Amino acid sequence: MNRLRKFSKKVIPIVAIILLLGLILSRVYQPDSTPRPEITISAEEANQYIGDLAEVCGTVVSADFAEHIGGEPTFINFEEPHPNQLFTVVIWGNDRPSWSHPPEELYANREVCVSGRVRMHDGTPQIVADSPDQFRFRD
């Protein structure tokens, strides 16, 4: 019985530490890419899916690299040009090196779909893209 108590006094703290480390690591780990969403919607429907993981599809009608703005964003606007766009994809400057060609040239005047979490910004639904893997061409 004494041996069992001594054994449990040593083993229980070690097991607790291992479980705690596993919990911490599971909260910290982030997958490399955004998972493909189960829903595909049009740019016109995006405002109905705020907060959802979705694939939004439409025609890119304007795309601009705003290097003079903090964060150097690239804006990819769907269906109508800025300021009347129905949906926007934002690519921050620090993510631009992930693209082999400038995104504002690559997607301009193309039918594309982009996957990610739909958010609302200044009255326009948007997805922030940090990887070209979030995009696919429809044409």
Image (cartoon, rainbow, N blue to C red):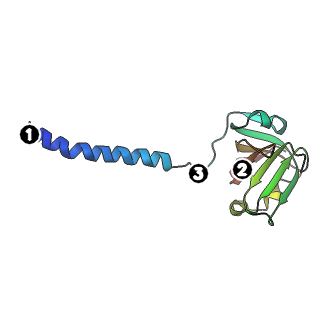
Which amino acid type is marked by label 1?
Answer: Asn
Q: Which mark is residue 125?
A: none
Q: Is 98 above or below relative to 47? A: below
Rendering quarter of residue 92: bottom right
Q: Are marks 3 and 2 in contact (CB under 8 Å)?
A: no
Using residue 12 as the reference point, say whether residue 66 is left or right of it: right
Q: Position of residue 110 (x, y in %)?
A: 86, 49
- Helix, strand or loop at label 3? It is loop
Which residue appears farthest toward the bottom when viewing the image?
A: 68
Q: Position of residue 81 (x, y in %)?
A: 91, 49
- Helix, strand or loop at label 1? It is helix
Q: Which residue is mark 1?
A: 2
Instruction: For marks 1 and 2, give the CA distance.
Output: 60 Å
- Helix, strand or loop at label 2? It is strand
User: Is the residue marked by circle 3 packed among few (<14), some (14-19), or many (20+) residues within 10 Å?
Assistant: few
Instruction: For marks 3 and 2, give the CA distance.
Output: 15 Å
Q: Earlier in the sequence, mark 1 or mark 2?
A: 1
Rendering quarter of residue 53: top right
Foreground label between 1 and 3: 1
Q: Position of residue 37 (x, y in %)?
A: 67, 37
Q: Which mark is residue 32?
A: 3
Q: Which residue is mark 2?
A: 128
Q: Quadrant of the C terminus?
A: top right
User: Is the residue marked by circle 1 packed among few (<14), some (14-19), or many (20+) residues within 10 Å?
Assistant: few
Which amino acid type is marked by label 2?
Answer: Val
Using residue 65 as the reference point, say whether residue 118 is left or right of it: left
Which residue appears farthest toward the front when viewing the image?
A: 122
The answer to which of 137 and 108 lies nearer the viewer is 108
Q: Are marks 1 and 3 in contact (CB under 8 Å)?
A: no
User: Is the residue marked by circle 2 packed among few (<14), some (14-19), or many (20+) residues within 10 Å?
Assistant: many
